Amino acid sequence: MLKGVTIGQFFPGDSLIHRLDPRTKLLATIALIAIVFVSQGFAGFLLIAAFVLACCASTGIHLKFLFRGLKPILFIVLFTFALNLFFQSGTTVLLQLGPVKITAEGLRMASFMAVRLILLVVSSQLLTLTTSPIALTDGLESLFRPLEVVKFPAHEIAMMMSIALRFIPTLMDEADKIMKAQKARGADFETGNLLQRAKAMVPLLVPLFVGAFRRAEELALAMDARCYRGGAGRTRMHQLRFKGIDALAALAVLALLAAVIALNAFHVW
């Protein structure tokens, strides 16, 4: 049930994307998400998907693992598809059963929104799969640093975000172990109505939250024992520097944006 969660996991490698500066990958991910929203047709989505799949293939990460991360949001995708399919108004009726009708416009909008959600998740996964938590923290802190003039806690926010991402797989593994232990004791998480299933989750959530608080306390004690005092006066083993491959990555994303805008302007599919 929980093995499909891939967000927060990092796969070491030596590909071009792995070697990119974390700031480049953060900005490219934000730009890619914006491009997904900018696209107004399936032709743009096809171009974005080709770009993302090419990036994934270059990293050596198997596509099955990448798409396995879609399992946790499958319900949201199907729910969004159904809402747009049955409630989107249109003139071209494809099927009608009493008051419920499916139109060509509703089918197109439902497919459009479902593909958009899938592209958003797949695009975002590349960031965490190819960037270590330490590099992600350094990149976030560097991008937030200009906001320190208005007393914005750049280092603290970056650290919290990276720790949260880092512990998602750990908590998922712990939740899976607790679920298996509760099932061995006779707990049933899969039958009954929605209310009964919600009540059955209590034996899972209570020990999971207790374990999360225990891990947080242990992490705080470990950081305090190592005299961690935040970003003030802190040095880094690896200094962040933009390289030629970062410029090429920026040009590739800009070219993708220009192509999507051109497709929108010519109303291509």
Image (cartoon, grey):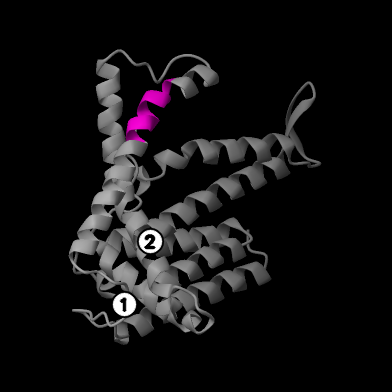
Kind of residue sitting beneath label 1: Asp
Q: Which residues are magenta?
A: 200-208
- Quarter of the picture containing the C terminus is bottom right
Q: Which mark is residue 160?
A: 2
Percent across and percent down for residue 95 are 72, 29
Query: Whole-percent x and y of residue 107?
Result: 66, 41
Q: Eyeballing the image, is 185 above or below 92?
A: above
Residue at x 47% of width, y 81% of height: 148
Of 93 and 119, which appears nearest the observer? Answer: 119
Q: Is residue 104 above or below residue 246?
A: above
| Image quarter of residue 136 | bottom left
Callout 2: 10 Å neighbours few (<14), some, many (20+)? few
Query: Label 1: few (<14), some or many (≥20) within 10 Å?
Result: many
Provide the residue designation for mark 1. Answer: 21
Confirm whether the magenta stretch covers residue 45.
Answer: no
Q: Is residue 158 left or right of residue 65?
A: right
Judge whether residue 204 is colored magenta.
yes
Which image quarter holds the N terminus?
top left
List x then y, in percent, for residue 204: 36, 28
Instruction: Look at the picture and state if 191 lies above or below 154.
Output: above
- The kind of residue tagged 2 is Met
Q: Is residue 211 shown left or right of residue 115? A: left
Decide whether the magenta segment is chiefly helix, strand or loop: helix
| Residue 153 placement (x, y as % from top left) | 45, 73
